[in-house]
Amino acid sequence: MSTTGQSTDRTPEIDTDLLITVSGPPGCGATTLCSRLAEAIGCPYVSGGDIFRELAENGKLSLNQQTAEAEKSADIDRLLDKRLRSIAEKWGATDKPFILESRLAGWLAGEHADLRIWLDAPDEVRVNRIEDREETEAEMRVREVSEAGRYQAYYDIDVDDREFYDLMINSSRWSKEGVFTLIKTAIEQYDEEADEGPFETPPVDV
C-alpha cells in the first residue's frame, strides 16, 4: 500500500474528489502516474502490486514463487481482489479523492469509480522500462499471460475488453510529464453536471 505526503512546489495541485482507477500491463507507467497524481491531489493511493508483494513477504516467498503459487490456487488472487474491492467500497463511501491501481482496478471498483484510466505502451517500450526491476522480460511476459488466464478462469474477465474505460492512453507517445498533464487536464475539466454517465461495469464475483 502506498500513501503519499503533501504536494511540493514543483507539483501543481489538483482539486478533486474523484475516485480514480488506473490499470495497464507491466511497464505501462501506472506507478509513476499514480505517484504524481496522488501527490498533486493530496490523496492516498493503493497499488495491487504492492499488496501482492506484501502477501508474498508475509508468506516468505519471492515474487516469482508467489506468482507460481497463484497459478496453483485461486486463493491468492481472490484474497488480493477482495481486499482491493473492499478498499474501493470504503473510499467510495467517503466522497474523498482516492487512487486505486491494478490490472483489474476498473473492474473491481465498479460503480465506486468516477474515472477509469487504462495506460499501455508497445511491448519493446515496456520491456525497456522494467529492466531495473526485479523481474526479467521473460518473467514479465509469463506473468502477463498467466494473470490474463486466471482472470478469465476465475471471473470470466477478458482484460482486452476495455470498452468501459474513460481514458486510454499510449504512454510511449508522451513524456511522463505529458501523460500527467493529459490526466490532470481530464480531471480538472470533469463536470459532474454535464456527465451523462459511464459505461456499465460488468459485475465481478470475487
Image: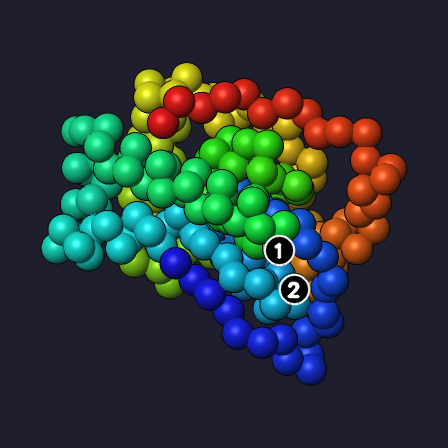
Q: Residues within 10 Å of mark 1 (few under 14, many from 20)?
A: many
- Where residue 113 appears, x then y in whole percent? 60, 39
- Is 27 on the left-hand or right-hand side of 53? right
Q: Residue furthest front?
A: 93
Q: Who's the residue at 17% across and 37% down the image?
A: 69
Q: Residues within 10 Å of mark 2 (few under 14, many from 20)?
A: many
**Tag 2 or tag 1, which sits nearer the N-term?**
2
Q: Which mark's residue is nearer the viewer, 1 or 2? A: 1
- Is 144 on the left-hand or right-hand side of 8? left
Q: Who's the residue at 41% across and 17% down the image?
A: 156
- Where residue 54 appears, x then y in whole percent? 27, 55
**Residue 140 visible to an observer of this rendering:** yes
Q: Residues under labels 1 and 2: Cα distance?
A: 8 Å
Q: Quadrant of the C terminus?
A: top left
Query: Could you tell me which secondary element the residue under label 1 belongs to?
Result: loop
- Where residue 59 appears, x then y in whole percent? 14, 51
- Residue receiving disc 1: 97
Front residue of 12 and 172: 12
Q: How many badges with numbers are in the image? A: 2
* Mark linked to residue 41: 2
Q: Residue furthest bottom?
A: 9
- Is 19 on the left-hand or right-hand side of 141? right
- Where residue 34 appears, x then y in whole percent? 55, 57
Q: Residue furthest left?
A: 60
* 168 vs 134: above or below: above
Amino acid type, callout 2:
Ile
